Image: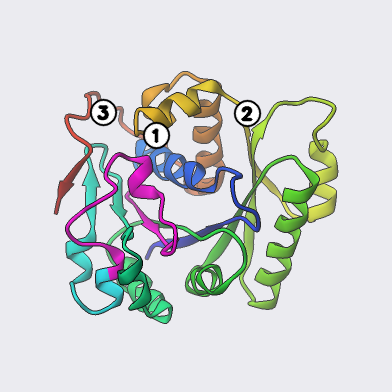
Amino acid sequence: MAKVYAIISGKGGVGKTTTTINLGTSLNSLGEDVIIIDGNLTTPNVGIHLGAPIVPVTLNHVLSGQAKLEDAIYEHESGTKIIPASLSLKETERVDYRKIIDIIRKLKKLTNHVLIDSAAGLGEEARSVMQACDEVIIVTNPEMAAVTDALKTIKLAEEMHKPVKGVIITRYRGVRTEMPIANIHDMLETSILGIIPEDEAVKISQVLKNAVVHTHPKSKAARHYIETSKRLLGDDYKEPIIKRGFWAKLFRLR
């Protein structure tokens, strides 16, 4: 049975979607079967980040009863599977967020890991995603405002009885104007799952509409995402058989 992680940030713009995509593709490169869901139904970004903003069937269609779940799953050449959300505002209006829990139950029978890219903030969308997950992963920057919002997210998870797997700190530069990692740890009182350094390769990968772990596998950011994924797997991590090859196309419809 799969483990479902809600990737959440109390503050927008901290790299939550980038982290979700790279965490998912990192897990896949380690031999794990992964499905990434764009749970940000109001302002979805997963498809945009991967160069497929418009697809025939989306999560919105499934939530509104217009399509089957299997038809909304698209597979990257790497083997990572994605369920994008629709960019249409009209399709968002017809969505019942509560049905996400039912979708997650079905997905847990199809894969090893489900990563849900949540909407920023702590509104109805984020709460629905948190309700559907097994554990919460919080993304933040090493800035007081972002860390404060991360603390609010942790408190909400505690109220909803959802365990926090850890915090991933992104865009870390190690300069004096940032919060020290030790201070962030003390303030949030939870484990630091990963520290992703500020890296120009991430910006380039976004222009290329791909994950940095594939466009720049030797970059600092890519290496840290891989290490974070290994940490996420913990004792379940096993060295995979290396598969060589290049992605011929971004998605293929299942």
Q: CA distance from mark 3 to mark 1?
A: 17 Å
- The residue identified by callout 1 is 211
**Mark 3 secondary-structure assignment:** loop
Residue at image point 41% right, 45% down: 24
Would you say residue 116 sits in the magenta stretch?
no
- Percent x, y for residue 61? 24, 70
User: Of the residues under marks 2 and 3, which one precedes in the sequence?
Assistant: 2
**Mark 1 secondary-structure assignment:** loop
- Percent x, y for residue 244? 24, 24
Instruction: Tell me whether the residue at label 2 lies in contact with that at label 3, contact meaning CB atoms closer than 8 angstroms.
Output: no
- Percent x, y for residue 12? 60, 52
- Mark 2 crowdedness (10 Å alpha carbons): few <14, some 14-19, many ≥20: many
Bounds of the magenta span? 32-60
Q: CA distance from mark 2 to mark 3?
A: 27 Å
Would you identify the image quadrant in which residue 43 lies? bottom left
- The residue identified by callout 3 is 243
- The residue identified by callout 2 is 197
Residue type at mark 3 is: Lys
Looking at the image, the residue that sits furthest to the top is: 218
- Mark 1 crowdedness (10 Å alpha carbons): few <14, some 14-19, many ≥20: many
**Mark 2 secondary-structure assignment:** strand
User: Of the residues under marks 3 and 1, which one precedes in the sequence?
Assistant: 1
Residue type at mark 2 is: Pro
Q: Is residue 29 above or below residue 7?
A: above
Residue at image point 62% right, 27% down: 198
